Image (cartoon, rainbow, N blue to C red):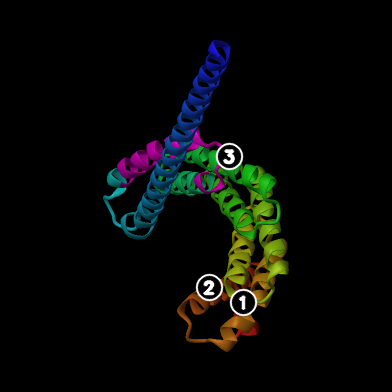
């Protein structure tokens, strides 16, 4: 009887220990789940705030003369927040995409205010991050478009630094991406306008290099893409202004190639 009571007591003790262990594991699991939810909430709030901040700087502050210092200060704050998120989750694609926006915007500010080495560094980082996104999601058009924007920014800086051959190669990378994106959605007006802008940038560089005939080919390609949209909506301001730029470049290049003004009328 005594031995039976001892076995029962041991079974009770083991049962209590197992119960306590299960309760502890459940509590740890609930705590971990709660911390995960809080971390996800903080991540979403921080990401939303930094994206809004980047939009405000790009849309409202950047065009204002004298707002450069304020823009840089806000971008530094944004960089710190995004850097912390990236350190916590290096594989988070949304955070990487926000970092691309950050570095591209920083590059534009440095480029427009004379800090060309700094601008080159920022665009280089934007390209590096964009390429990593494209490797991860090769079929994402939005990631491809980010990469094309970063290439254009870098090419512009290289052109300002008189590295014309390297700038030309970089513009061509952006143009190739945009033409591929246009093949995916041939009737997308935004994609067409982006391709037109790429042709104009590449053509302008060719003219700088003295390659007028090749530049004219780029301008005529731009005209072919833009003209149908402009004719459908001649009063749309963005089409009209871009078409003016295309036609001006074509006429200017034709004149430099020896065509008379009367023949261009």
Residue 242 marker: 2
Give the residue at x 34% y 40%: 77
Q: Nearer the viewer, residue 107 or 264?
A: 107
- State the residue position of label 1: 226
**Quarter that holds the N terminus:** top right
Residue span colored magenta: 71-95
Q: Are marks 1 and 2 in contact (CB under 8 Å)?
A: yes
Closer to the N terminus: mark 2 or mark 3? 3
Camera-near label (1 vs 3) is 3
Q: What separation in Å lies between label 1 and label 2 (alpha carbons)?
A: 8 Å
Quadrant position of the C terminus in the picture: bottom right
Where does residue 51 sit, x and y in percent of width and height?
41, 52
- Residue 76 lies in the magenta stretch: yes
Residue 91 circle label: 3
Q: Are marks 2 and 3 in contact (CB under 8 Å)?
A: no
- The disc, 1 or 2, on the residue closer to the chain's N-terminal end is 1
Residue placed most toward the observer, 204 or 14: 14
């Amino acid at each position: 009887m005594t031995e039976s009571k001892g076995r029962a007591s041991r079974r009770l003790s083991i049962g209590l220990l197992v119960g306590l262990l299960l309760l502890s594991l459940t509590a740890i699991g609930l705590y971990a789940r709660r911390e995960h939810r809080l971390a996800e909430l903080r991540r979403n709030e921080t990401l939303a705030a930094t994206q809004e901040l980047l939009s405000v700087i790009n849309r409202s502050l950047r065009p204002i003369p004298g707002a450069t210092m304020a823009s840089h200060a806000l971008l530094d704050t944004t960089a710190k927040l995004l850097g912390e998120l990236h350190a916590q989750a290096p594989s988070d694609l949304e955070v990487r995409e926000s970092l691309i926006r950050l570095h591209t915007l920083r590059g534009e500010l440095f480029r427009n205010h004379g800090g060309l080495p700094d601008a080159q560094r920022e665009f280089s980082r934007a390209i590096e991050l964009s390429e990593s996104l494209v490797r991860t999601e090769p079929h994402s058009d939005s990631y491809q478009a980010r990469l094309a924007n970063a290439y254009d920014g870098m090419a512009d800086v290289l052109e300002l630094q008189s590295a014309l051959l390297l700038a030309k190669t970089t513009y061509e990378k952006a143009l190739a991406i945009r033409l591929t994106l246009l093949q995916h959605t041939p009737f997308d007006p935004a994609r067409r306008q982006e391709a037109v802008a790429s042709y104009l940038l590449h053509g302008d560089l060719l003219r700088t290099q003295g390659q007028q005939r090749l530049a004219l080919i780029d301008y005529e390609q731009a005209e072919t893409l833009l003209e149908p949209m402009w004719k459908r909506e001649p009063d749309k301001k963005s089409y009209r202004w871009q078409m003016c730029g295309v036609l001006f470049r074509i006429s200017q290049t034709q004149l430099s190639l020896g065509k008379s003004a009367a023949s261009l009328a």
